[in-house]
Image (cartoon, rainbow, N blue to C red):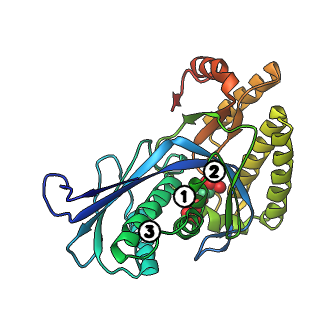
Amino acid sequence: MQRKNQVKGDGFERGLMKWESQAPSNLALIKYMGKTDASINLPSNPSFSYTLKHLTTTVSLEQIDSEKDEWHSAESVTLSASSVARFMSHLERLKVYFGYTGAFLVKSVNNFPQGVGLASSASSFAALTKCAAMALSELTGKPAISIDEQAALSRKGSGSSCRSFYESWAYWEGVQVERVDTPYPELLHQVILINQQEKAVSSSEAHRRVQTSPDFSTRSLRAQSRLTQLNEAIQEQDWPRMYRICFDEFWDMHQLFETCTQPFSYLSPTIKQVLSQLQAFWKQKGDGPLVTMDAGEAIHLLYRPDQKAMMQDIRQGLLGAYHVF
Ligand code: DP6
């Protein structure tokens, strides 16, 4: 985190003080899907994620002499009007929390493409929360707030962002988020971007729709049971079992998408083909990457550090025809 005084913004001097923070994205292996209270993003089930330290959002807040906060639209970030409004209303929530009424110019930049299943909302809301917590405690003279408090505030902006405050693994249930130690502190990450269009159904909308699936009433039990099994498998370092649990888990979430009253699907023929190739790879080698998908047409792969050569082989062979990030 950095703080600069008297920064010049894009060629014109208007800033009084400027703050900047960075936060990583995270990848859930047990998914947050469905809410018990959408107004403060309380999840229907516990989730468990690996923090993607290399995929970050940087947010800056520049104090401005204005009635209202302003969003600076960077060329690389094309957010819909509703996404910008949601982001700015989170800043408003943080200002209310600190009792601050001044205005900011808000800038946000990702080091990865947005809206393609790479969970940019997690890193951007976490970075905004971190940055605002720093700026607002300084501007109001109020004490700095702890990481746990920042995560709880960030959750209200976007649920999954609360997990981005903890490395390398995070567990979130209800209002509680915590760091988890595992025998896998470092994993390698690869993502296959099949469709780079902005997703048609936002994850917030997905959380609403899934509740109408006939399978939703038992979803929380399934997620909890997989979480227990995944923890066991991680402790036992049983990587093939971890792979099977993670596969079943994302498939379960995507079945909810397909069976709700306004169904939608990310399991395109190409996605299904790549998934089958990955399953065949596992069958043949008895080893391979963990596979998961969020709400988008992207497949995430996690490898152990000793699988580095396999990761390169898969990229050049099995995934040679695809855009791999
Ligand atoms: C599929 O955190 O983006 O990535 O709380 O409405 O902002 P809101 O939803 P969001 O949901 C993420 C859903 C997911 C699974 C996960 O990350 O756990």
Q: Is mark 3 within 8 Å of ligand 1?
A: no
* Place of residue 231 in the rendered image (x, y in percent of width and height, measured from the top left): 82, 47
Residue, x 54% and y 64% (percent of image)? 158
**Which quadrant does ligand 1 occupy?**
bottom right
The answer for how far apart the CA atoms under marks 3 and 2 are is 25 Å
Q: Residues within 10 Å of mark 3 (few under 14, many from 20)?
A: some
* Place of residue 188 in the rendered image (x, y in percent of width and height, measured from the top left): 62, 32
Q: Is mark 1 within 8 Å of ligand 1?
A: no
* Place of residue 126 in the rendered image (x, y in percent of width and height, measured from the top left): 50, 59
Residue at image mark 1:
201
Q: Is residue 124 above or below residue 68?
A: above
Please tell me whether mark 3 or mark 1 is closer to you in this view: 3
Q: Which mark is residue 250?
A: none
Residue at image mark 2:
265
The answer for how far apart the CA atoms under marks 3 and 1 are is 16 Å
Residue, x 53% and y 30% (percent of image)? 324
- Residues tagged 3 and 1 counted as in contact (Cβ below 8 A): no
In this view of the protein, can residue 261 be seen by the observer?
no
| Quarter where residue 85 is shown | bottom left
- Judged left or right of residue 274, residue 100 is left
Q: Amino acid at mark 1?
A: Val
Q: Amino acid at mark 3?
A: Arg
Front position in the image: 298 or 308: 308
Q: Secondary structure at mark 3?
A: helix
Going from N to C along the chain, the mark reached first, 3 or 1, is: 3
Front position in the image: 308 or 147: 147
Q: Which mark is residue 86?
A: 3
Please tell me whether mark 3 or mark 2 is closer to you in this view: 3
| Quarter where residue 41 is shown | bottom right
| Quarter where residue 277 is shown | top right
